[in-house]
Amino acid sequence: MSAPTANRAYRPETRLVHAGTMRSQFNETSEAIYLTQGYVYDSAEQCEALFSGKEKGYVYSRYSNPTVAMFEQRMAALEGAEAARATASGMAAVTTAIMGLVRAGDHVVAAKALFGSCRWVIEDWLPRFGVETTLVDGTDLAQWKKAVRKNTKAAFLESPTNPTLEVIDIAAVAEIVHAVGGKLIVDNVFATPLFQSPLKLGADIVVYSATKHIDGGGRCLGGVVICDEKTIVDNFQQYLRHTGPAMSPFNAWTLLKGLETLSVRVARQTATAAAVADRLAGHAKLARVIYPGRKDHPQAVTIKKQMTGASTLCSFEIKGGKDGAFRFLNALNLIRITNNLGDARSLITHPTTTTHQRLTPEQRAELGIADGLVRFSAGLEHPDDVVEDLLTALETV
Ligand SMILES: *Cc1c(COP(=O)(O)O)cnc(C)c1O
């Protein structure tokens, strides 16, 4: 197989198409799917050399696989990082990144506005193993400063957050966490690799759910952990090899195809989300519209400092609480009700009764998740059809 193309000098759009490609002796144009569990060896000696690590190569697909490696190398090149490891889902990536850094007696700080399952890992799972956790308001730097301790090994945040699209100052949080010797993990799903580069802002590890924009067609689950090679070898490699959250080679191939079109999809989806935000802002049936591309966003200054684009998502609060939101959702014709995002189809979610159902009403209020709030994810349809569907449905509220 040919060595992967590095493509470090090229711009992100070019890396998305070419980086990491390894061609077999057949010189195929598109990446091959190596749908194999294992590998055979020329001799017992070669097998021994591969197992001892003296010779580099593939021994078992729970450890590594050529198609998965192409996906990993493309993601690492995209982030300007040394290395990446793919996982079966975004949650496997998040769990690997956090669990790999800590042991009993350590402490983890996280921003409380988190994807539901991430919050469960931090609040319910880690404490079972003697890891203490503190949740803070991610936009309040004083709370991060107060929360970190000598034994804070990891900090975790997502920005923009789900579903209120708050933006956290990554460089400032990285400095606070580094002062006590901890590592900052950033869940960059909502920003996509195109609009925010957490490693360049000072974060140590980036995680993605590739299930979202990277797949982009609602087909596969996938995740990836991206950082320097030493951090992977010291903290994640053994965990990944021996607990087994490996990505399927078929999914890796699908995600490689997704990456090829990521930049054009995200550009179109962002333009549509911005059009939706502008058309809905000030609408009589809405209590508020939240969009990171608008001047009225509460963290507009931080957005300008750390992001190169806004968002493919826009959240808004329907007046009339849950009843108003449900009437609106049920009146939509084109936009589909679901909990996913980043798809080719425009999608809409009611966080209170789905992704954030597990939280108490007080916890939701603290996060600004009102009963009338909905989260819209722009697809690839004509923007006017999407806006018309939203406006028509709002008339029924
Ligand atoms: C979807 C999502 C995850 C989890 O990813 P899965 O692929 O569903 O396991 C984690 N973080 C964020 C921000 C997400 O949107």
Image: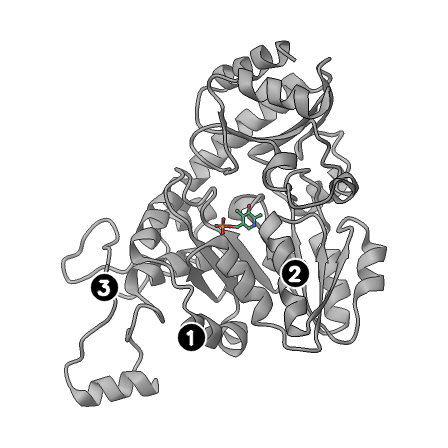
Element under label 3? Answer: loop
State whether label 3 is within 8 Å of ligand 1: no
Describe residue 131's horizontal placement relative to residue 31 as left or right: right
Quadrant in which the N terminus appears: bottom left
1 or 3: mark nearer the eye? 1
The x and y percentages for residue 61 are 31, 68
What residue does disc 3 label? Answer: 36
**Residue 203 visible here:** no
Q: Is residue 81 above or below residue 322?
A: below
Residue 186 vertical placement versus 319 (above, below):
below
Residue plotted at (64% across, 30% down) = 315
Looking at the rendered structure, the kind of residue marked 2 is Asp
Q: Foreground residue, 350 or 100? A: 350
Among numbered discs 1 and 2, the one appearing first in the sequence? 2
Give the mark, 3 or 2, whose residue is nearer the N terminus.
Answer: 3
In what quadrant of the picture does the C terminus appear? top right
Residue 358 pos. (x, y %) = 65, 46
* Alpha carbons under labels 1 and 2: distance apart: 23 Å
Residue 201 visible to an observer of this rendering: yes
Q: Alpha-carbon neighbours of circle 2 within 10 Å: few (<14), some, or many (≥20)?
A: few
Q: Which amino acid does label 1 sit on?
A: His
Which element is circle 2 on?
helix
The amino acid sitting under disc 3 is Thr
Q: Which mark is residue 124?
A: 2
Residue 30's x, y, as percent? 24, 49
The residue tagged 1 is: 242
